[in-house]
Image (cartoon, coloured by chain):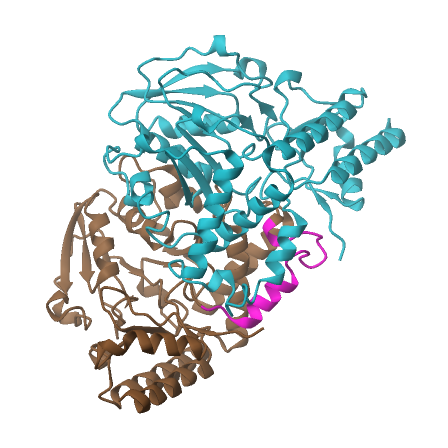
Chain colours: A brown, B cyan
Amino acid sequence: MTRVFNFSAGPAVLPEEVLAQAKEEMLDWRGSGMSVMEMSHRGKEFMSIAEQADADLRELMGIPANYKVLFLQGGASLQFAMVPMNLLRGKAGADYVNTGAWSKKAISEAKRYGKVNVAATTEANKFTSAPAQAELALDPAAAYVHYTPNETIGGVEFPYVPETDDVPLVADMSSTILSRPVDVSRYGLIYAGAQKNIGPAGLTVVIVREDLVTEQVVDGTPVMLRYATHVPDGSMYNTPPTYAWYLAGLVFQWLKKKGGLAGMAEINRRKAERLYAAIDGSPFYKNPVEPSCRSWMNVPFTLANPDLDATFLAEAKKAGLVTLKGHRSVGGMRASIYNAMPEEGVQALIDFMADFEKRNG
Amino acid sequence: MTRVFNFSAGPAVLPEEVLAQAKEEMLDWRGSGMSVMEMSHRGKEFMSIAEQADADLRELMGIPANYKVLFLQGGASLQFAMVPMNLLRGKAGADYVNTGAWSKKAISEAKRYGKVNVAATTEANKFTSAPAQAELALDPAAAYVHYTPNETIGGVEFPYVPETDDVPLVADMSSTILSRPVDVSRYGLIYAGAQKNIGPAGLTVVIVREDLVTEQVVDGTPVMLRYATHVPDGSMYNTPPTYAWYLAGLVFQWLKKKGGLAGMAEINRRKAERLYAAIDGSPFYKNPVEPSCRSWMNVPFTLANPDLDATFLAEAKKAGLVTLKGHRSVGGMRASIYNAMPEEGVQALIDFMADFEKRNG
């Protein structure tokens, strides 16, 4: 068996130790005689798995006691609707910061349910930066402020947490959650599709301040799309995605062994700095993002000569470096270097890039 | 390793061969160097898995070409909202047949979006039968007719497919899909949570006649809750639950090896007949359901002396027969004997029941 270095933006690489443990436990979880995916979600075996995952995530992120953690389905794309449906609470609208493709989708969905005030947009510079705090035209009457701390496609990351006074801050953290410590108390609600830094696709983690979980939802909101449905039932109003929840729990355990989020932050900073240094160090490669806003997780880059793109990708694949093609809206390459991408993987990419340049530069 | 016989109603037992293959392929799917759960859903490896699963399900169920198969999230509980949101198409309401707990949840959710005509209910006999065709008070102007072919909690199954003329028939097949052949052309839409006969929790299969997929949805329907969003994108509008989809595909392959749905029907009929015969053959055990409507998949039964329930469950567990506790609303026991429950498992339960009776009767 030869494992590749997989730079997919999501679903993405998982820690090899996690996969090995899942493999080991596949037919018989700790003497239960069952696979985790065969267990009743209400049985004591799965309940223990679910509770451990919740506790470990709380410990890793330092989640305050007045926040609930939900393990849901539907991805960030469903949260784009659930957030306004649940958080407008009779107010006219909300503030949205537009920093790229995922912000836009969130905005488009929110418009069905209320007035969207675009508090700032970086469309003029083709989404290659995040707006500064002073550039945010926030409405004090907004129901909430929504932003995307890391844009997976553009590779743009906020270098700060927006200050929104008493207005709850909502963040789509899909591609940055768990990459470093975060002060959860700054947020009203955090959501993240699992398939980048948490676990497999099909699980969505929502962290919500309990006072924001109310019955005051937009008319016609399905019972499944109400946070108030899932909170009292511990995310078990209906059958949750149990196996994905279990795998997320294994990832949380792995993160704790790696030194928690402070430990991951050090590693992630080092990986990103090395890769950006390699890109900046040569006219052969280019990343368009303002240096202070460069993502630690998603690193898009182009070749000076795009005619070489296909060759680059084919040769990279032969070298065991896969899923490097950039998003069609940006072109070029994208290396997603989430928590589970080892430093050796980033070094292998850097070495390959240098070698490719030597042969084609 | 000792595997138990797991009678859980869902998530439920999976074929051991399927779990063994998933284990084998966990860190490296067919030389790709990746786990299936690490693959980009848009890459050629996962696309081949997804397409094979779609083709195999079509072959198994004989799905006509004018039906689309969707691999979604959210479970049957989310379909309870998606069905009216998408299928009312400007009509005032729909017909619902009420045969128990799951019908009731579907009805309650549908009432948010239109008028619900309860075409028949078996509440008077405590949901121990299905209504006959002649008892269905169908409204020819209904947008659709919804029913629950198999009630997982009550253990009641329709012995026929309702005739609804030109009104589309919608079925929550969560706990009966794939248990025997079915004439898909009789239905407008079929949906099923995966965690019984298809695969792990977190995947929902929807089979929909293409003329019912329209843009005419209830106001405020989120983009993620529109069938018209998922059909053109092959269930990849956003990241689908890839690993669950893969496992469903392995189950479909296993079913083909077992002789397809005709083969499964023979086995399932045999398993159910044996278990009901054991229950009916003794005054010690009782199943309340009208014999013609007894479920092949979920077999609830009570002990004549409910004081023995706890002992029964504890001793059964020691004998490797687990998750037999009945739903709290029905009491007693429930043996769910889905496709993946081997005949030996049912025989082991019957033997245990006889022995328990001998010692306690």
Work out whether B296 lies above or below B30: above
Residue B115 occupies quadrant: top left
Is A117 on the left or on the right of A331, as rendered? left
Indicate the position of residue B9 as horizontal and vertical percent values: 61, 38
Indicate the position of residue A238 as horizontal and vertical percent values: 49, 41
Work out whether B101 lies above or below B16: above
State the quadrant of the C terminus of chain B: top right
Work out whether B185 lies above or below A149: above
Residue A147 occupies quadrant: bottom left
Q: Is residue B86 magenta?
A: no
State the quadrant of the N terminus of chain B: bottom right
Residue at the far left: name it: A124
The residue closer to the viewer here, A164 or B135, is B135
Indicate the position of residue B14 as horizontal and vertical percent values: 63, 46
Q: Please provide the residue range marked out in magenta.
A: A13-37
Q: Is residue B95 visible?
A: yes
For the point 60% across and 55% down, which residue is it?
A48
For the point 60% across and 68% down, which residue is it?
A20
Indicate the position of residue B307 as horizontal and vertical percent values: 77, 30
Is B314 on the left or on the right of A91, as rendered? right
Is A58 on the left or on the right of A331, as rendered? right
Q: Is residue B297 visible?
A: no
The residue closer to the viewer here, B266 or A224, is B266
Q: Is residue A14 magenta?
A: yes
